[in-house]
Amino acid sequence: MRTLLVVETSPRGEQSLSRGLTEQFVTEWKKNNPEGRVVTRDLMTTELPFVNAPWLKAYFTPPDHHTAEMKDLLSLSDELVAELLAADDLAIGTPVYNYNVPAVLKAYIDHIVRKGKTLGFAGEGLVHGKKCTVLMASGGVYTEGSPIQDRDLATSYLRLILKVIGIDDVTVVAGGNAKAVDLGETTREAFLQRFAREIAMAAKR
Ligand SMILES: Cc1cc2nc3c(=O)[nH]c(=O)nc-3n(C[C@H](O)[C@H](O)[C@H](O)COP(=O)(O)O)c2cc1C
């Protein structure tokens, strides 16, 4: 039985376009994996602290020397890492904010890139055999041929960090021109429909 881990990051609830894209992906994934299990990690309802000095001290202390306080500090990170390692497939729904991923997704990444768990001590990725689909909503369009393609930092960053931990089978569904929905030039449904085929293909691979 395959497990899909869905990481949601948009604060916009039912208005969110990235969540709409992710929902389509989950529907398609379920068609291909009727027995599969979907685990959702919603970063809007997960209290994710930023990395601070006590957390780093715990991070750099060998586990057999951890105090109860250190164990406590790392417990959420341990849980997020275990959740990731238990999944076969990963879907990340995310907006683009200021040309990059939202801070909450960066905070999540800081919790799951863990030496000895997802990243080896020689810098090698330890997360193997997983496929990731990124469902990204952006006001602008950054795909091939766009005059602002060089601003697509969010995609490059996600591909890079996923590769660093060992996930190199990554498909990005670039939901560009989301601003047309906010400006009332198109509907949420019509926007989401534009990516239905691409999402179905991504869920099949
Ligand atoms: C604070 C903020 C910053 C944004 N920055 C960018 C940006 O740099 N580039 C872009 O294309 N869209 C940007 N957008 C537009 C969002 O990517 C777009 O509204 C997207 O649909 C948000 O995802 P969601 O619908 O899942 O919440 C920004 C939106 C907000 C609220």
Image (spheres, grey):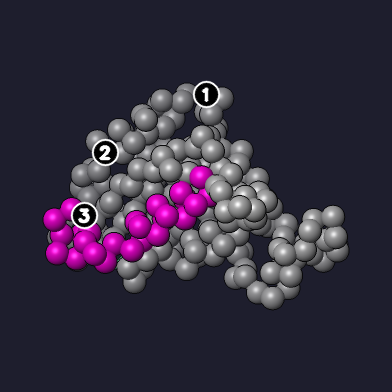
- Pointer 3 residue: 143
- Pointer 1 residue: 35
Q: Position of residue 21 (x, y in %)?
A: 34, 47
**Residue 103 shown left or right of residue 28 in the figure:** right
N-term mark: 2 or 1: 1
User: In the rendered structure, are the residues bearing label 1 and label 3 in contact, judged by CB atoms less than 8 Å apart?
Assistant: no
Q: Nearer the viewer, mark 1 or mark 3?
A: 3
Front in this rendered view, residue 175 or 115: 115
Q: Position of residue 141 (x, y in %)?
A: 21, 59
Callout 3: helix, strand or loop? loop
Q: Amino acid at mark 1?
A: Glu
Q: Position of residue 130 (x, y in %)?
A: 49, 37
Q: Nearer the viewer, mark 2 or mark 3?
A: 3
**Residue 143 shown left or right of residue 101 in the figure:** left
- Residue neighbourhood size for the residue with mark 1, other residues' Cα within 10 Å, grouped as few (<14), some (14–19), many (≥20): few
Highlighted range, magenta:
140-166
Q: Amino acid at mark 3?
A: Thr
Q: Which mark is residue 198?
A: 2
Quadrant occupied by the N terminus:
top right
Q: Can you tell which quarter of the image residue 86 is in?
A: top right
Mark 1 and mark 3: Cα distance apart in space: 35 Å
Callout 1: helix, strand or loop? loop
**Number of numbered discs visible in the structure rendering:** 3
N-term mark: 2 or 3: 3
Callout 2: helix, strand or loop? helix
